[in-house]
Amino acid sequence: MKETVTDIKDLDKELLGKLDEHIATLDLTRKEESLIPTLYKAQELFGYLPHNLQWHIARQLDLPSAHVNGVVTFYSFFSEEPMGKYTISVCMGTACFVKGADKVLDKILKLTGTQPNEMSEDGLFTVKDVRCIGACGLAPVLTINEKVYGNVTPDDMDEIIESYRKGAADDKDS
Amino acid sequence: MIKTAEALNKWKQTLINERAYRLELKICAGTSCISSDADLIVEMFEKKVAEHGLNCEIEVVKTGCFGFCGQGPILKIEPDNVTYVRVKLADVETIFNEHLLNGRKVYDLMYKNRDDEDPAESEAGMAFYQKQLRIALRNCGEINPEKIEDYVRNDGYKALADVLEQNDPEALIKTMRDSGLRGRGGGGFPTGLKWQFTRASKSDEKYVICNADEGDPGAFMDRSILEGDPHSVIEAMIINGFAIGASNGLIYIRAEYGLATRRLFTALQQARDKGLLGENILGSGFDFDIEVKLGAGAFVCGEETALIHSMEGHRGEPTTKPPFPSEVGFRGKPSNVNNVETYANIPEILNKGAEWFKSIGTRHSNGTKVFALAGNIRNIGLVEVPMGTTFEEIIYDIGGGIPGGKDIKAVQIGGPSGGVITKDKLDTPIDYDSLQEVGAMMGSGGMIIMDEDTDMVEISKFYLDFTQDESCGKCTPCRIGTKRMFEILERLTDMEGTPYDLELLETLSKNVQSASLCGLGQSAPNPVLSTMKFYRNEYEDYAHRRKKTAYSIDPEKCIGCTKCKRVCPVDCIDGKVREVHVITESKCIACGACYDACPVDAIVRP
Ligand SMILES: Cc1cc2nc3c(=O)[nH]c(=O)nc-3n(C[C@H](O)[C@H](O)[C@H](O)COP(=O)(O)O)c2cc1C
Ligand code: FES
């Protein structure tokens, strides 16, 4: 079992401030309905939802932390683990699967040296398999952050992944 | 602000009269086409038009999806009635110079129904569109979804204005019932009846909920509608609110649908600014507003009770019905849940009348249905056909048949809750009842075509993997049952199964079907049962472990080109140049690389 950290002193104060500002704008007479939008905001700010952040949200919204954790773990959109700079979502919907998306996924996992939903060691990539993203005409499809790549083959991936590695390195230099 | 029905009509007339463009350039800006640079193409055309000072003559319109996604990006020029397909950045120059400036059509960029045929100039000549009838998709690809003016020009908000003017909710519900419209979200429940029930529930507050969670992996019509014609859904929801006596609407949309969500927000704001949403709509005294709720990635949230729990900030777990949402729904108040496509039909039904809608389709299934055509088929995309169209017509006339000269094996319909239609039943008309008769269901509209090489056991494993992953875990039959079923299928495909596994799988399927709490579990075994019924021999091949899993080479066809040998990732192919090659079957991992590489079809699939 992983130890549960409940102390919020490790969390970035500035981001926390922004989150609290957001919470202050919510109608807390319906605190439960405010939870999912708050989690969205928190994940947008912090990138993921560690336990201490969930505790903080539970206190701010005056909800049982078990309820908050229950919601976070139910929905696949929320992550309790840190995410890479680039999220590669490989569509495993029916149309893509039929066109060999599994082979593309395998290739990406090999290139990034990760398992699904784990961040790569360099902090650049998190690879996910997702359900139909509604671009079946281009199957197999994957997205890297917001950009959609269609008709991809395992061989295309070398170049695509490399371009993001390079992009990240250039970002650092500049 | 538009304050009366008359003012709305006047505005519409002005919009029509103001339109004095010589040419309109309609370019699809749906998700699929954007990923093939459609937005850059739009920008380039806009720039060119501006450079040549043609802003008053040529309008560049960013529209929603044309449906023919496999041929995207698509560009339509009106009134010349010319459609170009697979337009690339490099083609902009040609189209601009040739067609727009000089009026010469670019035949190379037109679609061909068959390679040896002349190109089809417009949609009328494209087999893909000939048997389609677009009602729910009527504005997709026609208007700019980010402009309320475009929607109003095409009779938008007219149905709402009429309904408010007549001020007779009972008559409105009667029209809805007479039209015969049934829910397009999967259940097929008569929409008018649902409205009537929700109207009959007594409460100080009621809600109208639009289900835009679209969970079926392989269906994307709801997203296309929201991206291409968001106002039609908004208009229908307001009408729904008036019918049942609700003043609040909610749209629950999938988190992944970023573009659709942004367009919805834009549309809602425009409707509010014009006084078509909010307080005292069109001066009628009726108030209605709509809020958007984002889903967070869970298939089961498409089920209406789970959806309501999710909107309330809970885990999206379903509860037993009754009580139905029409009695106890969001915040415990009566709520009317309808699907996006259901809503998109409504303004048109009211504009053209219940009789008109009823005359389309079959006796108990009226109107049209949108299908997402995918899999091993030539024309991939969204198609809308009258109920009663047969599978054959969709696959061969609209879909252009199976590519690569292969034969069809089956059609999967209804997604993870559906079943397969076998090759000999392709003449089945598609309507609610005929599908039930052949052991399938309408579902939300995913239609996957599978060719002769498809392994049906793998397909049912794929769907079960999905449902067991998405099972919310609340009830035991679904949580544990689907997992055990998946394990049996895995055992079979790993060649570790026994004939007894088939019996076990069947019994378990039936138990999960009858004992699960919600539709997810109740329908999860459908793909397994239906494939077991029609393709039992494939299951038996696995169960008796006589299924071949390695590729081989046909010595008659092999020309010894060495291509397969070079691509094999595990080096299990031997042979010299210009001599027949051989696969060592024990080493083959069945990746299929050789199959794709072979220029003469000499590789035999397992
Ligand atoms: C597991 C499950 C998933 C569902 N997913 C959806 C969905 O994604 N979209 C949808 O509109 N309806 C879905 N439904 C059906 C809804 O519960 C509900 O019947 C529908 O939204 C009612 O609208 P309609 O009458 O207009 O079809 C689902 C049902 C079940 C059991
Ligand atoms: S199945 Fe991949 S986009 Fe639809």
Image (cartoon, coloured by chain):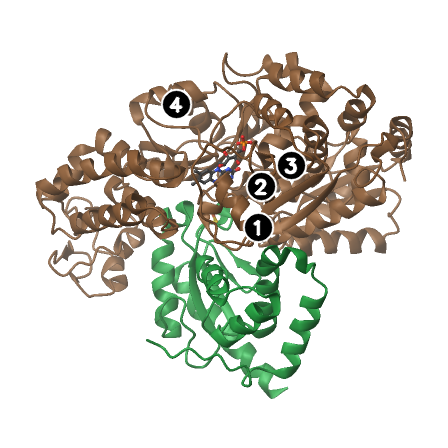
Mark 1 or mark 2, which is nearer the start of the sequence? 1
Q: Check disc 2 and report the residue beneath it.
A: B332
Residue B435: which numbered mark, if any? 4
Task: Tell me where residue A73 sits by quadrant.
Answer: bottom left
Residue shown at the point (12%, 56%) measured from the top left? B585
Mark 1 or mark 3, which is nearer the start of the sequence? 3
Of B348 and B178, the residue lying toward us: B178
Any idea which chain is the green one in this picture? A
Disc 3 to disc 2, C-alpha distance: 13 Å
Q: Amino acid at mark 2?
A: Gly
Disc 2 to disc 1, C-alpha distance: 10 Å
| Circle 3: element type | strand
Above or below residue B413? Residue A162 is: below
Q: Are marks 4 and 1 in contact (CB under 8 Å)?
A: no
> 10 Å neighbourhood of mark 1: few (<14), some, or many (≥20)?
many
| Circle 2: element type | helix
Of A10 and B231, the residue lying toward us: A10
Disc 4 to disc 2, C-alpha distance: 35 Å
> 10 Å neighbourhood of mark 2: few (<14), some, or many (≥20)?
few
